[in-house]
């Protein structure tokens, strides 16, 4: 065991020694290899250093040879460039001396038809001017090119004027009417474009204007522009007026913006529809009101100018009055037609001015510099606007003169115009935005004048109704409706068509604090108060006029007819709705007045029916012989009844109740009262022998009495 343990370590040590020796041998071989490689690397490095040193030497030699050559070449190139630039500058400078000659022909021939080429020549001349001014201001060439430049500018200005004059034409009336038309059936309106100048011409004008502003330092062309376009604007509006006169005279058709009429040349389009104004309505009212103002107040004509109402038949007397009016004033119809056309034409011209002015501003904005646009536009529209305002002032002056003559129908001319002006005021103001205050104030001033004169006419009309004299020869002999009544109602009916305008007229004269903000409701109450005032004045005047009649029954028939006519007119025309704004019981009040007059009329029959009563009737027993005195009483009763019946029927048959319903009602009521009383009287006298000739006293059977009463108020009987 001891021997074995000592042998094992000895073997391990030998193996380890061999292993270490092998590793050492390998390391020595590796070291030897590295040394060899290092030696080779040193040799290569030394060779590379030698090559690089040789290359560097050669480069230095090359640089010392090339750099002087390069510098000489660079200097030569710079000299060549300087020579070229000098030659180019010389050519450029020399060209300025030839500009006048080179551009002479084009400048003399002008820019017409070759604007771009012409502007290019002007640009050359302008550069020559700048050159000589900067480099040789004393040279004669400067004066030459300056003169050529001024000549070119003058010809451009002349071309600007020529193009505007040659191609600016008035807008055709039909196109204007289409532009201001409104078709309610179309949800989206097709805007009519007013093309004032051909596109190519417009572009040339814009180009010339731009050059004159930027290079010509010239603003005179703006004056030329507004003068030419102002003339065309005015001619366009005058052409529209002439169109109205010619077409209305030849065909009788008024192309009103209020009436949907179709023109022959545009069958698919509706005529303009702006204000609600029907030509002819006012004319009829003016005919009647002129008749009233000229004859009714002067007391030279009696009668009544009734407007047909439902329930009113064609009573011959009523027809006589209206026929007299037609015959006497038929000659004025032509004049009134002309007035009607003028009103409608003026309304159209207001709308046309707004549309044309807007179109002119759109055109102007493309041509005139922005900071000059408002001033130029202001000048451009002055002539047309002044003519419109002058025409409006003439209408106001004519109305003022008519009011002095007590012709209150003149206010009816103002109503449609004033309403249209106010309807278009916001658009008018928008169009004139930016113009001078004097320009913007022209329309409000005209509106104020119309409202003032209109309110004056309304107030004076109300006073004339109150103060119309009670002249016997001016009273209808048959007790029918007085012309004062029919004309007052006719006037008020016209106010109904323009109730907002009339209310605003009255409100414009209010100075109270409550009128500081005019609302529609406030204006409506003012108009209602005014209508009630006219009706109140009319009622008082009619009551006064009725006293002219000596017969109280005829006076009652007269008042009945007038009150009934007023009530029916109010109800039919819806005036009653305006009246009840301030007088809730107006309708019942008139019915009470009518009933009172019927009762007063019935009392006229008391002198007939009183003979049929039991008063003074003798008391007798059947079969008893009457005394002479008692027989005479019965005879007197018969005679009184017969004479009274004949007299009343004879008189009242010539009276008139135009309203058939009222006439039949009064007849039936009176027939029933008289017939019942007469039948009762005959029954009491049936068995009494009071005369040998009963047919002498018993002249009429009850049926005959009824027939006689049935013929009351019937001139044909």
Image (cartoon, rainbow, N blue to C red):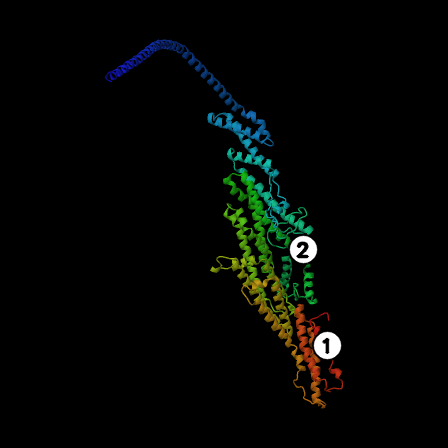
Residue, disc 2? 334
Image x and y of residue 239, in percent: 63, 46
Quadrant of residue 400 within the rendered picture: bottom right
Foreground pick, 691 / 508: 691
Foreground pick, 185 / 289: 185
Residue, disc 1? 703
Quadrant of residue 19 within the rendered picture: top left
Residue 466 visible within the image: no
**In this image, 76 relative to 620: left or right?**
left
Residue drawn at (61%, 66%), measured in percent from left and top? 567
- Earlier in the chain: of badge 2 and badge 1, it is 2
Residue 436 visible within the image: yes
Q: Residues within 10 Å of mark 2 (few under 14, many from 20)?
A: few
Foreground pick, 654 / 178: 178
Q: Secondary structure at mark 1?
A: helix
Image x and y of residue 498, in percent: 58, 57
Q: Quadrant of the N terminus?
A: top left
* Position above or below: 165 against 4: below
* Position above or below: 521 against 382: below
Image x and y of residue 503, in percent: 54, 59
**In this image, 502 relative to 623: left or right?**
left
Image x and y of residue 210, in percent: 53, 35
């Amino acid at each position: 065991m001891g021997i074995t343990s000592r042998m094992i370590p000895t073997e391990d040590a030998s193996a380890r020694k061999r292993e270490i020796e092998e590793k050492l041998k390998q390391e020595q071989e590796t070291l030897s290899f590295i040394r060899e490689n290092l030696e080779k690397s040193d040799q290569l490095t030394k060779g590379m250093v030698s090559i690089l040193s040789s290359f560097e030497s050669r480069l230095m030699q090359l640089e010392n040879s090339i750099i002087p050559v390069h510098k000489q070449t660079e200097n030569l190139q710079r000299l060549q460039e300087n020579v070229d630039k000098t030659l180019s500058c010389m050519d450029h400078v020399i060209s300025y001396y030839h500009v006048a000659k080179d551009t002479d022909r084009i400048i003399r021939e002008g820019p017409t038809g070759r604007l771009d080429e012409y502007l290019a020549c002007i640009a050359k001349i302008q550069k020559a001017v700048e050159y000589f001014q900067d480099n040789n201001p004393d040279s004669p060439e400067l004066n030459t090119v300056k003169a050529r430049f001024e000549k070119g500018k003058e010809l451009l200005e002349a071309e600007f004027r020529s193009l505007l004059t040659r191609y600016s034409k008035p807008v055709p009336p039909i196109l204007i009417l289409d532009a201001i038309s409104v078709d309610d059936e179309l949800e989206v309106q097709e805007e009519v474009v007013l093309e004032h100048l051909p596109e190519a011409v417009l572009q040339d004008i814009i180009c010339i204007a731009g050059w004159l502003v930027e290079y010509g330092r010239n603003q005179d062309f703006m004056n030329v522009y507004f003068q030419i376009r102002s003339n065309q604007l005015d001619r366009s509006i005058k052409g529209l007026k002439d169109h109205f006169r010619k077409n209305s005279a030849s065909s009788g058709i008024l192309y009103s913006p209020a009436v949907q009429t179709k023109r022959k040349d545009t069958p698919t389009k509706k005529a303009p529809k702006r204000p609600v104004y029907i030509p002819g309505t006012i004319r009829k009212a003016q005919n009647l009101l002129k008749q009233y103002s000229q004859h009714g107040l002067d007391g030279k004509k009696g009668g009544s100018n009734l407007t047909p109402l439902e329930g009113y038949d064609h009573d011959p007397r009523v027809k006589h009055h209206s026929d007299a009016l037609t015959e006497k004033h038929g000659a004025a119809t032509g004049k009134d037609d002309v007035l009607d056309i003028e009103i409608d034409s003026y309304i159209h011209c207001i709308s046309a001015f707004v549309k044309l002015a807007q179109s002119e501003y759109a055109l102007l904005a493309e041509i005139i510099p922005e900071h000059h646009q408002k001033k130029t536009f202001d000048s451009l529209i002055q002539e047309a606007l002044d003519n419109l305002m002058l025409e409006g002032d003439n209408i106001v002056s004519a109305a003022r003169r008519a009011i002095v003559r007590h012709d209150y129908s003149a206010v009816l001319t103002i109503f449609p115009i004033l309403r249209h002006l106010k309807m278009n005021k916001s658009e008018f103001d928008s169009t004139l935005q930016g113009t001078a205050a004097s320009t913007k104030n022209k329309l409000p001033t005209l509106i104020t004048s119309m409202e003032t004169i209109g309110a004056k006419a309304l107030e004076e009309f109300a006073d004339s109704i109150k103060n119309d004299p009670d002249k016997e020869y001016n009273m209808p002999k048959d007790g029918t409706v007085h012309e004062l009544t029919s004309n007052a109602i006719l006037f008020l009916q016209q106010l109904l068509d323009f109730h907002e305008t009339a209310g605003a007229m009255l409100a414009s004269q209010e100075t109270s604090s409550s009128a500081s903000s005019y609302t529609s409701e406030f204006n409506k109450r003012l108009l209602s108060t005014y209508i009630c005032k006219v009706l109140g004045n009319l009622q008082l005047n009619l009551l006064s006029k009725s006293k002219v009649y000596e017969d109280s029954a005829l006076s009652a028939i007269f008042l009945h007819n007038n009150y009934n006519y007023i009530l029916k007119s109010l109800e039919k025309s819806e005036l009653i709705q305006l009246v009840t704004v301030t007088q809730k019981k107006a309708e019942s009040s008139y019915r009470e007045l009518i009933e009172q007059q019927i009762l007063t009329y019935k009392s006229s029959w008391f002198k007939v029916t009183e003979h049929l009563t039991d008063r003074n009737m003798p008391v007798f027993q059947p079969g008893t012989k009457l005394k002479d005195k008692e027989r005479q009483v019965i005879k007197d009763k018969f005679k009184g009844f017969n004479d009274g019946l004949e007299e009343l029927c004879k008189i009242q048959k010539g009276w008139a109740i135009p309203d058939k319903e009222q006439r039949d009602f009064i007849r039936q009521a009176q027939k029933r009262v008289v017939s019942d009383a007469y039948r009762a009287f005959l029954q009491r006298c049936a068995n009494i022998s009071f005369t040998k000739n009963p047919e002498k006293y018993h002249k009429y059977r009850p049926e005959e009495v009824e027939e006689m009463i049935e013929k009351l108020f019937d001139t044909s009987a």
